[in-house]
């Protein structure tokens, strides 16, 4: 598949996470560095993935590099992204090492990498409707010999007291709030009410400045995933959560 076809597929990708899309977007930009259509195609990815902060952030950086004509800068950017991610993971591991009972939500790659390094005794995890990504994550943890307690999405209130800490990822970060899987807000409020520390691990490329915040938007998902009834149905996978509910952000900075 050529680089323009790759970028076109990324614009319509509703399956993969932001790290996957960012990596392929960078590789396509390197392959199509001299093609004027590359900038337009990357801009289309940004427009069509408005719920992915790192795609917006890094996408505009790639376009600036393509305009300036310095191909080496793309490779440098790739190394900076990798370094920022590793730094955020390392910060989280240093803080959470020794935690035995950890609670999380959804299936964040950064959360996974932290868990595999600190190896808690038990991970508490909800199913993650409608895509069941929590259940998929639970299966992966079990294969890696990590004990899992799996439960219905609305049951965090029943198990929060059994955990020592909550660790969440973030799809986007802003000055006053962050964005993550629906249900994270309730989980963070429950954690605060029980004095359970709530942490977020996400590298600095998930942060959107005022300049780029205007491009971010939560996309509604298919109504039929909620119900087939003939009424108004609301289906969002993500929500905004106040930064005041977070004890610490692990961003690697």
Image: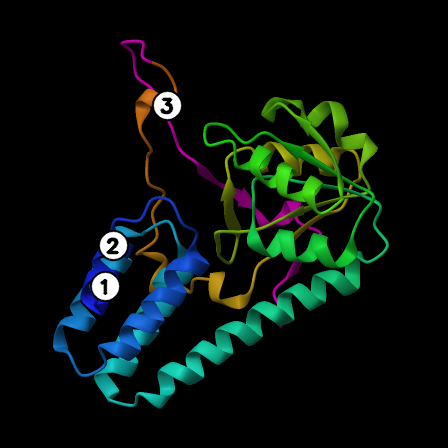
Q: Quadrant of residue 63?
A: bottom left
The residue pinned by badge 1 equals 1
In percent of the image, x 22 and y 83: which residue is there? 67
Local SS, label 1: loop
Q: Which residues are magenta?
A: 228-253
32 inside magenta stretch: no
Q: Is residue 194 above or below residue 218?
A: above
How far apart are labels 3 and 2 at the CA level? 23 Å
In the image, taking residue 236 as reference, residue 180 lies left or right, namely right
In percent of the image, x 66 and y 35: which residue is there? 125
The front one of 232 and 138 is 138
Q: What is the crowding at mark 3: few (fewer than 14 residues within 10 Å), some, or many (at least 20)? A: few
Expressed as whole percent of the image width and height from the top left, the position of residue 249 reads: 64, 58
Tag 2 near tag 1, CB within 8 Å: yes
The residue pinned by badge 2 equals 9
Tell me the quarter of the image containing the N terminus: bottom left
Q: Is residue 51 above or below residue 74?
A: above
Q: What is the crowding at mark 2: few (fewer than 14 residues within 10 Å), some, or many (at least 20)? A: few
Q: Earlier in the sequence, mark 1 or mark 3?
A: 1
The residue pinned by badge 3 equals 225
Local SS, label 2: helix
Does the rendering let one see residue 57? no
Q: Residue furthest top?
A: 229
């Amino acid at each position: 598949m050529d680089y323009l076809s790759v970028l076109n597929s990324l614009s319509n990708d509703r399956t993969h996470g932001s790290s996957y899309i960012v990596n392929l977007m960078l590789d396509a930009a390197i392959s199509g560095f001299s093609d004027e259509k590359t900038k337009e195609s990357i801009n289309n990815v940004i427009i069509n993935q408005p719920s992915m902060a790192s795609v917006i952030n890094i996408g505009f950086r790639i376009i600036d590099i393509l305009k300036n004509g310095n191909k080496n800068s793309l490779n440098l950017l790739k190394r900076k992204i990798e370094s920022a991610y590793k730094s955020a993971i390392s910060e989280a591991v240093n803080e959470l090492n020794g935690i035995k009972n950890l609670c999380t939500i959804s299936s964040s790659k950064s959360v996974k990498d932290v868990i595999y390094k600190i190896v808690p005794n038990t991970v508490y995890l909800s199913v993650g409707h409608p895509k069941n990504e929590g259940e998929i994550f639970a299966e992966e943890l079990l294969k890696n010999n990590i004990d899992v307690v799996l439960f219905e999405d609305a049951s965090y209130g029943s198990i929060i007291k059994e955990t020592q800490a909550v660790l969440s990822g973030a799809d986007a970060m802003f000055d006053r709030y962050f964005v993550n899987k629906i249900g994270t807000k309730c989980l963070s409020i429950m954690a605060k009410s029980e004095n359970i520390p709530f942490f977020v691990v996400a590298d600095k490329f998930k942060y959107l400045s005022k300049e780029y915040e205007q491009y971010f938007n939560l996309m509604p998902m298919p109504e039929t995933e909620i119900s087939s009834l003939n009424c108004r149905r609301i289906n969002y996978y993500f929500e905004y959560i106040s930064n005041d509910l977070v004890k610490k952000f692990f961003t690697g900075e």
